[in-house]
Amino acid sequence: MSLHDQEAFLKSIHPFELLTHKELTRAVNSMDIAYYKKDQVLISPNHISEFLYLIIKGEVGEYHKDELIKVYHNSNTFDADSLIYDKTEDTFTVLEELICFEMKKEDFKSLLDSNDAFKEFYISDLANKIQSAKQKEYTTQMSGFMIARIVDSYLHAPCIVNADTPIMEALHKMEEIKTNCILVKDSDGCGIVTDSILRKHILYNDYDKNGPIGPIALRPIITLEHDDFLFNALLAFTKNSIKRIIITKDGEILGVLEQLDLLSYFANHTYLVAVQIKKATSIEELKLASHDFINIIKKLHDKGTKVEYISKLIAELNEKVYEKLYEMIVPDELATNACLIVMGSEGRKEQMLKTDQDNALIIKNGVDVAQYEKCMKEFTKTLIEFGFPECEGNIMVSNEYWRKSFDDFKNEILRWLEAPNKDDYMNLAIFFDSIAVAGDVKLLDELKDIIYENVKDKDVFLANFAKAALLFETPIGMFTKLISTNDQIDMKKGGIFPIVQGIRSLALEEGIRETNTNNRIRLLAKANVLDKEFANIVEEAFDTLLNLRLKERLKAIGHEEDANNFIDVQNLNDMEADLLKDSFKIVNKFKNFLSHHFKISMVG
């Protein structure tokens, strides 16, 4: 192998691509090729290594107390930890005759000292190692846009006046500052006056242009902190259909972020799709707007955007479609007397590609439920035409079980909690994840209150509820070998569902109202239910599983299996396979935590 080939080989292995050209050359020059026979012990607690090994051919097993815990093969390195900490509790033995590069301990440590990113990979915890590996595999993960903060973008100088300021005086000040909106302060906080508000009140409502500006200011205003992510600003623009957000620093107004300036950071037409949904005047126009979602998902995924961010953005767009369709189909007098909710993965904001519908309608007491039957069946039929498949379990507003009065839902929830069967646990789980998308939101809030009030101190119920997370075996066996059937692994059963259900169970126990799994994990860590480091690795594992599933689904678009939960292990490269193995190991640790926390072994 020439020096050039050796350098190219080394650069293809994470984290060596983080080295500068000079450091990479130094690394290549410091390496020698070595050969070892099968069964030879390279490292042990009594024999600390003097080399970092990089496998060219062959396999090495890592044993902990005579148990084989990991197998290293082509392009893998080992054992940096023993070089860094001068100790190990494990033994490394050649399983198949080995050809490898060896880098001396002092040369390896020299690279650690000269390159912080390289060093960080080897000394970081498991969560950070998974993140670092993702940055290699998804080369644009957390790209410039994703790590950009609001303060990094262009902010317009704020024009701030008191509520009693005459309109013309405020306009002159706005002109001096060269901005296009006026922020109005009074004892109740802050409001905003834009060009459209001025036209409406002065040109059409004959408001005195020399009168005080306070009465025409629009409230409330949308604010974000200056160090928040730009992506969260995009979510706010999309959700609220607004053109500007007020940026604060420690509660004080810093400037104004304009939607057009944000879009200069963002290369796709997400905001335009949201506007198309808002302005749609027919079901056909709404349908056309919703068809652009798959292109948005593909573009974001290609850029390495985290699945959590993609799913939240698509969830905001989906909610707008649901809300608009509800307005179009349901007469006004009926729409305000009910609450349309989405449940399950939609309620958790974790559904991206259009999979089964999970929705329900809560109707105010005293209102004739039968009035909603025709329009709700039309609602379900139209969503199917939009590409949202019919739910196999019939969990849709077209089904009268999921379309009933507040009191009927209340009674059903109490029954789920008092004498549940298998289906009742599932129904409570998907309902617990619900969010309101149209109509009277208070109806859902009050039903959620009933759940929280009646689940307190129900230890046996919560243990049985959490037990569902343990139903499926994690597809990883001895020697961290992935277990597949015809090279297929069910990602939902194998890892996604155990995390979702386990975190959902902990959130139910703690009375956490957040529905998104990632946000629930963070709140559970904040409440000290989960250790912060453990919460981080669970969240990283969850993101990895979702990311690999989405990658496979995007490949399958247009085929019959495009919405399934399986991935083909033959499609995984070495980095992805390692990420998947690490994630499944974390899933098993999380399952053990759940068993202990809920004392699941003590329930039948």
Image (cartoon, rainbow, N blue to C red):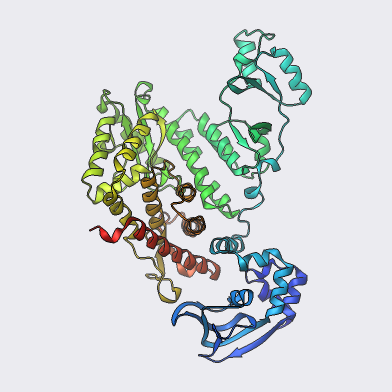
Residue at 48%, 51% (x, y): give it: 525
Please tell me in which quadrant of the rendered image residue 122 appears.
Answer: bottom right
The residue nearer to you, when weighing 501 against 268, is 501
Furthest-left residue in view?
419
Q: Is residue 384 placed above or below 105 in the rendered structure?
A: above
- Picture coordinates of residue 589, whole percent (x, y): 42, 64
- Picture coordinates of residue 313, whole percent (x, y): 52, 43
The residue nearer to you, when weighing 85 against 232, is 85
Q: Is residue 329 visible?
A: yes
Q: Is residue 358 visible?
A: no
Residue at 36%, 57% (x, y): give it: 597
> Does 386 sit left or right of 400 as displayed?
right
The residue nearer to you, when weighing 142 against 432, is 432
Q: Is residue 324 placed above or below 534 in the rendered structure?
A: above
Q: Is residue 197 placed above or below 232 in the rendered structure?
A: above
How many tags in the picture? 0
Q: Quadrant of the N terminus?
A: bottom right
- Picture coordinates of residue 508, whole percent (x, y): 36, 46
> Does 498 sit left or right of 460 as displayed?
right
- Picture coordinates of residue 18, whole percent (x, y): 69, 66
Residue at 67%, 70% (x, y): give it: 16
